[in-house]
Image: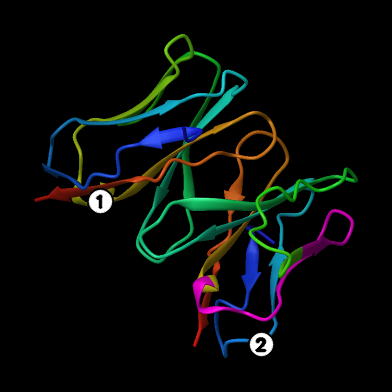
Amino acid sequence: GAGVSQSPSNKVTEKGKDVELRCDPISGHTALYWYRQRLGQGLEFLIYFQGNSAPDKSGLPSDRFSAERTGESVSTLTIQRTQQEDSAVYLCASSEWGPIAFGSGTRLTVV
Amino acid sequence: QKEVEQDPGPLSVPEGAIVSLNCTYSNSAFQYFMWYRQYSRKGPELLMYTYSSGNKEDGRFTAQVDKSSKYISLFIRDSQPSDSATYLCAPSDLGRLYFGRGTQLTVWP
């Protein structure tokens, strides 16, 4: 596709449920990133995939968060046992090198 | 100390003003320097990027990097109401980007 695609665009879930967020990067982009943006806050790094290298997971806030990437394509961010503080916009981005392009994000609301 | 410091504003200017947005950073390994613009309820969009120190101009926008002082600037000339958004600086060490908090800019007609 022309840009980074994320689904769903909005997700409302009950506290304690698991959620999966999907990201389709731009074709050919070897790097893929997940960021989180809480209301009125800056972007918080979560995880970074680069080709076949081990991902940089240093930003994941707890072991309830995990992410996978299939080759150099789709990535899934999973949040287990969601908490209200997980409510945020989850942004995916991809790049070939240098500048990265963002998707529109998934707005997650935990009620 | 955070990796990237950016004054969150808000900054409010009249149409036609010159806007100066700034960030400081602490990691001397940063090599690429990006500026993103984010409209309300949208993902960030890349505005400009520069490599190492120097200036880069694109229309009404000029990005400056001074690696010796670890200082990043974005200038907007002849600002327009459509420039109203949050501007995020994001240096990179060729891995992930490190974002500032963003500066909220309002340009009023």
Residue pictured at 57% horizontal, 18% vertical: B28
Residue A62, relative to residue B64: is it above or below? below
Picture residue at 59% right of the left edge, 24% below the top: B30
Separation (CA) of disc 2 from disc 1:
37 Å
Q: Which residue is drawn at 40% across and 34% down?
A: B5
Query: What amino acid is found at the position of numbered circle 2 in the picture?
Result: Lys
Where disc 2 sits, the SS reads: loop
Q: Position of residue B84 (x, y in %)?
A: 25, 51
The answer for which chain carries disc 1 is B
Q: In the shown orientation, is residue A65 left or right of residue B24?
A: right
Residue A92: name its quadrant: bottom right
What kind of element bears circle 1? loop
Residue annotated with mark 2: A17
Q: Nearer the viewer, mark 2 or mark 1?
A: 2
Rendered residue at 87%/61% (across/down): A70
Magenta highlight range: A67-85
Q: Name the residue nearer the viewer: A84 or A6.
A: A84
In this rendering, position of residue A17 left or right of residue B109:
right
Badge 1 crowding class, 10 Å Cα cut-off, few under 14, some 14 to 19, many 20 or more, is many
- Across and down, in percent, residue B42 comes to 44, 63
Q: Residue B74 carries which label?
A: none
Nearest to the observer: residue B76 or residue A47: A47
Judge left or right: residue A80 versus residue B59: right
Q: Name the residue under label 1.
A: B84
Q: Position of residue A16 (x, y in %)?
A: 64, 86
The percent position of residue B68, horizontal first and vertical second, equals 46, 9
Q: In which quarter of the image is residue A100?
A: top right
Look at the image and say whether residue A80 sits in the magenta stretch.
Answer: yes
